[in-house]
Amino acid sequence: QVQLVESGGGLVQPGGSLRLSCAASGSIFNIFTMAWYRQAPGEQRELVAAITDGGNTNYADSVKGRFTISRDNAKNTVSLQMNSLKPEDTAVYYCRIRGSYYNWYDYWGQGTQVTVSS
């Protein structure tokens, strides 16, 4: 049974920083892509940032230059460093991993709330 456990969310003032972490536990091999998504109230879930096993990254235009995604392949973890946070970054942030080991797999975390407010 694979589980994704996210941590690091919370309340922060505009201009502040937060670091989200996601750890995959269980029998998990060959993770190709690790990513962070977010969903604000009344909005669709959107991709924030993704990183491949080779280290290639992709960011939403709205977070480029402010957020940095990183991963530790040995520990099966992915992190999201969020700087210069804005109120519009307020959302539930979800971790997602995709890969293949005999079969393709696609797992989501339970989500962690990020609130940017003064």
Image (spheres, grey):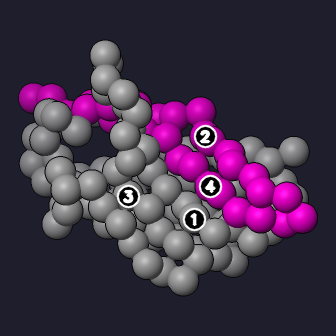
Using the numbered discs, state the Cα–Cα distance from disc 4 to disc 3 in whole angstroms. 12 Å
The reply, left or right, for residue 69 in relation to residue 13 is: right
Boundaries of the magenta span = 90-118
Q: Which residue is mark 4?
A: 97
Q: Which residue is mark 1?
A: 33
Q: Is residue 23 above or below residue 76?
A: above
Crowdedness of circle 4 by 10 Å Cα count: few (<14), some, many (20+)? many
Tag 4 and tag 1, C-beta contact below 8 Å: yes
Q: Which SS class for mark 3?
A: strand
Q: Which residue is mark 2?
A: 109
The residue closer to the viewer here, 92 or 62, is: 62
Q: Which residue is mark 3?
A: 49
Quarter of the image holding residue 25?
bottom right
Residue under the point 38% across and 48% down: 47
Q: Is residue 108 left or right of residue 12?
A: right
In contact (CB < 8 Å): disc 1 and disc 2? no
CB-based contact (under 8 Å), mark 3 and mark 1? no
Q: Amino acid at mark 2?
A: Gly
Rounded to the nearest whole Å, what is the CA distance between mark 2 and mark 3? 15 Å
User: Which residue appears at 14% of the width and 33% of the height?
Assistant: 87
Residue 94, how many percent across, how many down? 49, 41
Task: Determine whether, in the image, residue 114 is placed left or right of residue 6.
Answer: left
Disc 1 to disc 2, C-alpha distance: 14 Å
Please tell me whether mark 1 sits on a helix, a strand or a loop: strand
Question: Mark 2 near mark 4, Cβ–Cβ under 8 Å?
Answer: no
Depth check, front residue: 87 or 63: 63
Few, some or many residues within 10 Å of mark 1 (<14, 14–19, 20+):
many
Q: Earlier in the sequence, mark 1 or mark 2?
A: 1
- Residue visible at 19% across and 56% down? 61
Q: CA distance from mark 4 to mark 1?
A: 6 Å
